[in-house]
Amino acid sequence: MQGKIRWGSGSSRMAADWQDKPPRRKEPGVSVDANPNQFLEKLQQAETRREVFEHALAALLAYLSPERALLAYRDKETDELGAQATHGLDPQTVFVAGEISTELVKTVMRERQGMCMVDAIMDPSLGERTSVILSGLRSIVCVPIIHASRLVIGLIYADNRIRAGAFDASHQEWMEELARRIATKLPEVERSLSESSGRHKPVAADSINETTWNSQRQQAFTLFREGKAVQAIESLQELARQAEAFGPKDPRWGRTLGELAEMQRQSKILAEAERNFIQAIDHLEKLGPNHRNEMAPVITNLATLYFAQGNERRAEGLYRRALEIWQSHISADDKRLAPLLFNLATLRRSAGANEEAKTLFARALTIAEKAWGPEHAHVQRCRSALSEIP
């Protein structure tokens, strides 16, 4: 438990690591160890829809290294596309803010054919090019996700606004294979969840003593602080199961699952931690904007898991998303921002973006000095990192 900044005793925010050493890089934005096959294997083991799309996105980032990416799924009731996993795009506004070409998306969905554009600005096939021009899109590759019934159930999209010719036919073929894997896996996940819900009788809400439940939750945190990780994790697993009884509109299940995942991450039970982080985020996100502040620490801790694994692009995207959420919910000098800013700065320094890294390290230093004093180890770490940038 050393070398951590603790969010607060017994809180849902658990802990966040300060990552001192930037991962080695092959080129900006691509981890040396990034291997799309490892994420494709995780996709095959996914147990929820969220996991399917998260692992698919990670594989896409590892293989194509796009500037931005999106995986979308068509809602069965509304028939509308919804963002399931994104990189560099806001999932809440991606289809309404003109960030991507709606004409291209409609064409791919309608014709059930993938598209790969060398230079979108010059391509005559885009009848509606306003979003393309405004966003400066250059290279685009987009493929549909097609169900066995031939119904288009979603799409995969990647672009680059800087370089023309960033993608070619081989990238499109790889994405089409990824789309086939998703289309095959989703029905399996849905069937499994349906069968699971039929097998397990949920805990009745009126059978839970809320005071006792909260007390046991605090005891789990105490056990973890005392180094009794196995007992703490087992206790929180049971409490998370019980928390489902509070109902789908109650944040406590997602919050507890996020706490469990952070215990597992710190205990190096990484596969389960990742799965629980993703489920926690999924639950809290469904509750709407009022619970986004509860999502932020969970997103931050998932980002730190990816950071430690060398999955830098995924980590950076999640850190930025958490920062965006927190900046509208907490004060600018809140100490919870310090490790997030430090880790994001480390990633930007590793990418060669020194000026942005300086700004982020400086912000982390200011917050850390106010929170812990000028001689604290975290402050010294920030100061040292800042001084090392030319």
Image (cartoon, rainbow, N blue to C red):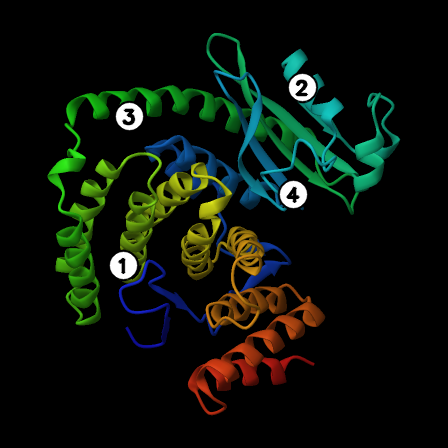
- Secondary structure beneath dot 2 equals helix
Question: Which picture quadrant has residue 16?
Answer: bottom left
Determine which residue is flagged by label 2.
Answer: 108
**Residue 292 position in % (x across, y down):** 48, 48
Of callouts 3 and 1, the N-terminal one: 3
Q: CA distance from mark 4 to mark 3?
A: 31 Å
**Residue 384 position in % (x across, y down):** 55, 85
Determine which residue is flagged by label 4.
Answer: 68
- Secondary structure beneath dot 1 equals helix
Q: CA distance from mark 1 to mark 2?
A: 43 Å
Which image quarter is the N terminus in?
Answer: bottom left
Mark 3 near mark 1, Cβ–Cβ under 8 Å?
no
Q: CA distance from mark 3 to mark 1?
A: 25 Å
As drawn, the label of residue 193 is 3
Determine which residue is flagged by label 1.
Answer: 263
Check disc 4: other Cα within 10 Å, few if <14, some if 14-19, many if 20+.
some
Of callouts 3 and 2, the N-terminal one: 2
The answer to whether any part of residue 213 appears in the image is: yes
Of callouts 4 and 3, the N-terminal one: 4
Total number of numbered discs in the rendering: 4
Question: Which picture quadrant has residue 362?
Answer: bottom right
Which image quarter is the C terminus in?
Answer: bottom right
Given the image, on which type of amino acid does mark 1 rest? Answer: Met
Check disc 1: other Cα within 10 Å, few if <14, some if 14-19, many if 20+.
many
Extreme-bottom residue of the structure: 375
